[in-house]
Amino acid sequence: MTILVTGAAGFIGFHVCQGLLARGERVLGVDNLNPYYDVALKEARLALLQAHAGFGFARVDIADREAMAAAVASARGSIAGVVHLAAQAGVRHSLVDPYAYVQANVMGQVVMLELCRTLPALEHLVYASSSSVYGGVAEAPFSTEARVDTPVSLYAATKTAGELIGHVYGHLHGVPATGLRFFTVYGPWGRPDMAYFTFARAILEGRPITLFNHGRMKRDFTCIDDVVPAVLNILDAPPAGDTGVPHRLYNVGNNRPEALTDFVAALERALGREALIEHAPMQPGDVEETWADIAVLQRDHGYAPKTTIAEGIPRFVAWYREHYGV
């Protein structure tokens, strides 16, 4: 059987593909390699995946329904699982290019669900949502039972829409799907638009970093090493349809919100350099704190994140130095 992974050249997608290949799965990766961030990094990830005999790749935009249908045509009878991670990411960029978010995160979700309901061997669709859906009013720690109808960014609104669409396809068509609300995932091969990545680059280059809300921020930083096993375990256990709509939501976080200033300190220690810090007000669409309630994921799948920032940040820094020759 085959696992279809969208966003295969992305940060989480790359690591999930590696995890699937390591356990002997055949993987069909899809990505459009869009230039939202450095395409060379995406190509480097992809090159590592393409070294595996069990990996196939198609450069396709997930919102292009004809192209997606063509990309999976030869494997459609063998696709047992779909891990849909392709999306237009970034809260701040959604203020600049809102159309890209609706196209990728809403239309792309519909295209993927329409595709899934025609796959004869499909057992489970796992798709990426985001902690951003909680907005600025959810009571911490954030529970999947909380209302998420007050988003504070268009990015968050499109991710909430994706969850609702997933529920509808479970209700109408019985598509077994699980949405994962990821909380600030970081680690080797990470995204250059994320704060930890831009901070590391600036610190090494002797440039100042900007801490928004004057540094009074907390994030539930989640290491990729804890994320991948969770995704694979969830993929292996589709929701049952006999107890209602076969659609679930889980938080994938560390259940340990860290002060942004502590995160910067961990970077300084790992890099062996002190940061030059500038403070600024809160940015539109941002939130002061994220904190994942992971009790349900622990109950259902034994999820137990182990990696602290004291362990995870040095792993990222070691990769960064090697990859960029610093």
Image (spheres, grey):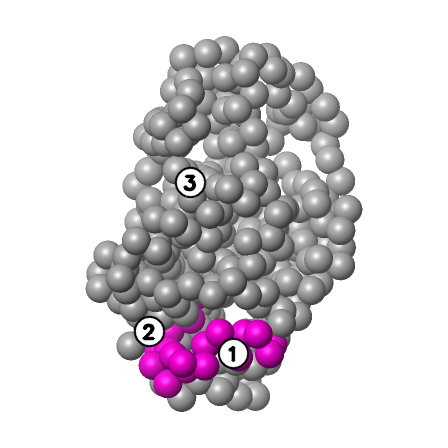
Q: State which tag comes first along the sequence, 3 or 1.
A: 1
Assess disc 3: are there few (<14), some (14-19) or many (≥20) residues with their C-alpha within 10 Å of its C-alpha: many
Q: Which residues are magenta?
A: 65-83
Indicate yes or no whether the magenta region holds residue 77: yes
* Labelled disc at residue 70: 1
Question: Alpha-carbon distance for marks 3 and 1?
Answer: 29 Å
Q: Amino acid at mark 2?
A: Thr
Residue at figure coordinates x 64%, y 62% from the top left: 104
* Labelled disc at residue 189: 3
* Labelled disc at residue 2: 2
- Describe the element under mark 2 as helix, strand or loop: strand
Q: Amino acid at mark 1?
A: Ala
Q: Nearer the viewer, mark 1 or mark 2?
A: 1
In this rendered view, identify the residue nearer to me: 262 or 83: 83
- Describe the element under mark 1 as helix, strand or loop: helix
Q: State which tag comes first along the sequence, 3 or 2.
A: 2
The quarter of the picture where residue 289 lies is top right
